[in-house]
Image (cartoon, helix red, strand yellow):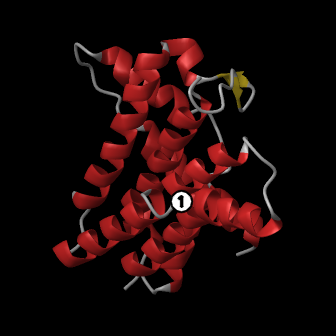
Amino acid sequence: MNYERHYEQYRAAVEDYLSALFAGSAPYDRLYEAMRYSVLSGGKRIRPVLTLEFARLGGIDWHLALPYACALELVHNYSLIHDDLPCMDNDDLRRGKPTNHVVFGEANAVLAGDALQTAAFETILTADYPAEVRAAAALELSRGAGRDGMCAGQVLDIEGEQRPLTLDELKLVHRKKTGALLEAACVIGAVAGG
């Protein structure tokens, strides 16, 4: 199977999985609408594709790792929603569309991001895997996204707006803000693949 076809197969499976999330009806449909708006607005889906490929390389049917792969995409999208907020980068466009806070308001955007983050952990912790595998995957996601990972990178990025960064400081921003979640995607795939 060539790279492009393999990538598109993974990507299509991820899109199908994500499309089924948050589709229910509730008195707080606006929250679900805001979550779906960001999650389904496109993107390359690099993180989930990496997770699925590493799971496949571990020797399992990669379809089994879809909950883990999509959990990474939920965290990635929560981070994009928060990154675009007026208190962060104050962006009005993301992927050529109005950002979440422009469409749904700042408070709803914050809550949509928060809900995507918690939904990611719920997705991992309810996946059809042994408890120790689910726990290991959740731990890797929390490390990649948390205080020494993506969140740390965002802090460094914000601080870097106040002064010029050295090359080493810039590398650290990228290693934390972007690289930590990419690394987590690979490790989580390996965890899923055994």
Badge count:
1
Vertical order, 157 against 57 (above or below)? above
Q: Which residue is labeled 1 in the image?
A: 48
Vertical order, 31 against 151 (above or below)? above
Residue at 64 percent of width and 46 percent of height: 159
Residue at 37 percent of width and 68 percent of height: 64
Residue at 21 percent of width and 77 percent of height: 132
Residue 21, x across and y down, in percent: 37, 38
Residue 62, x across and y down, in percent: 46, 71
Q: Amino acid at mark 1?
A: Pro
Is 172 situated left or right of 183 in this image?
right
Residue 66 visible in the current orientation: yes
Q: Quadrant of residue 136?
A: bottom left
Is 156 situated left or right of 26 in this image?
right
Tell me the SS state at disc 1: helix
- Residue, far front: 163
Q: Quadrant of the C terminus?
A: bottom left
Residue 174, x across and y down, in percent: 69, 61
Residue 30, x across and y down, in percent: 37, 15
Residue at 50 percent of width and 62 percent of height: 149
Is 182 situated left or right of 125 in this image?
right
Q: Quadrant of the N terminus?
A: bottom right
Q: Quadrant of residue 140?
A: bottom left
Pointer 1 local density, CA inside 10 Å: few below 14, some 14–19, many at least 20: many
